[in-house]
Amino acid sequence: MKLTVEDFTTSTGWVASDATKVSVKALNELPDYIAGYNTKSLVFEFKNDALNEYIEKDLSVSPFDVTNYNELVFHVWSREHQNTGVGLVKASDFKYKLDIYSSEGFLIGLSDHFQDITFDISEINTINKIRITALSNTGDFILFSEMLAVKDELPLDIFQGTKEAIENVIDNNYATQYPIGTVTASAGDTDIDITGNRNWIDKYAVITITDGVNSETHQIAENTEINFKFNSMYNGNSMLKNYTAANVYLKIPVGFGRSAKEIFLPGIAIWGMTPEPILRGSKLDKIYDTYKSDFSATERRDAQIQNHTILVDCEARETQTEILADMSQLVRNFIAKEGLWINGKKFYIKHLGSPTFLEGLTKYNQINKIQWEFSVEVKEEIYSRTTIPAITTQNLTMEASV
């Protein structure tokens, strides 16, 4: 479960405390420095004399209710302030502060690569601003990408991440998907006549209707040769808008079983098996995060690593062999990237075996399937955080033995 707080793909709305010292520098388009499946990330510039200066975006008009979320995750990179393996051991190691509400903010720790940062927001109900403050006079460019409020719900979050990844591949390869024909209809119509190549659409198919201004998506519940009725899925069982000779496209839906709903054909279905515990690492290790201005932090135990096996089924009728092959290629493109974003964090996936072709059992409305399989290791965050006091002094005494 996640809530997008800021995607950082636009410079709109950012205001600096002193525009001569802090500013929005550019929109980055290098994919290695963009989280999730966004198209851009945002670069801020802090001048050499920008200590305690900030840049912020006011969200108070439409604040984010984060009552049901327990972590804030985003990605950040700094050109100048990169800790190279030393770790975060004192307040001066933190070069920026993040404020998301009225009281005290969080210190941002950086490493030598583009990385995700996690803050505990379990005691915060509202995010009404995003303010980034410099804690150093060293001039710097700092990059931010995709800020999410999250609460892990595995394995549903893995299914959702897989769904978003495949949909991203579909959008990049089939912007308009498969053209079917045209339709003229009025708002409230519960059935429509489609003119054109209707061979690709049948019961359970999902279609998108668009005239370039308005668009809506429906699933076919029943049909004759030219007339089609909808079920309650997607935009419902009746037309939302009036259309004249609007374009109709076959949509490739991607889904997973969270609740009872109609099958979609053709379509891509995601499901999984019981995860396997991985006996690597220690569940007793301490993890520290959510550092505040007084250098207090939260402490939790490291989590259990679980290896999840995910199955991706491409399904279509026997008459839709071309679409079945296209869907299989789309899944292959996704797996070949070997990466999966889950709740704002990037995980690496491993392709398992070869895709399997499964032929339908009957000759009537025969449904064929190509099944892909991959695995992903995630940590089950099951341990509660405990706030620990700030470190005020650090002493190291070494004595030689005689």
Image (spheres, rainbow, N blue to C red):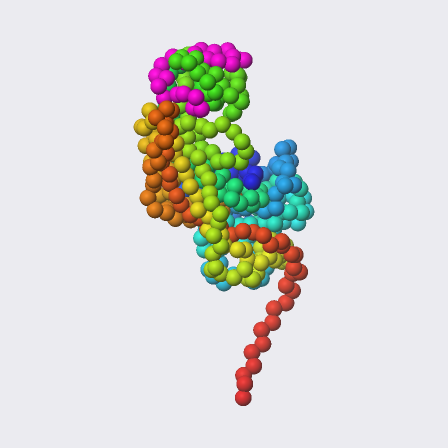
316 vs 383: above or below: above
> What is the residue that sits farthest to the bottom in this orientation?
402
366 or 38: nearer the viewer: 366
Left or right: where does residue 24 sit relative to residue 349? right
Residue shown at 42% from the left, 14% from the top: 224
Where residue 173 appears, x then y in whole percent? 36, 32
Q: Is residue 197 magenta?
A: yes
Q: Is residue 325 magenta?
A: no
Q: Is residue 19 visible?
A: no
Where residue 73 appears, x then y in whole percent? 54, 46
Q: Which residues are magenta?
A: 184-208
Hey, which quadrant is residue 330 in on the image? top left
Where residue 215 appears, x then y in whole percent? 47, 20
274 or 13: nearer the viewer: 274
Residue shown at 31% from the left, 28% from the top: 322
Q: Is residue 342 visible?
A: yes
Q: How many marks?
A: 0
Where residue 157 appears, x then y in whole percent? 51, 42
Point out the image quarter for the C terminus: bottom right
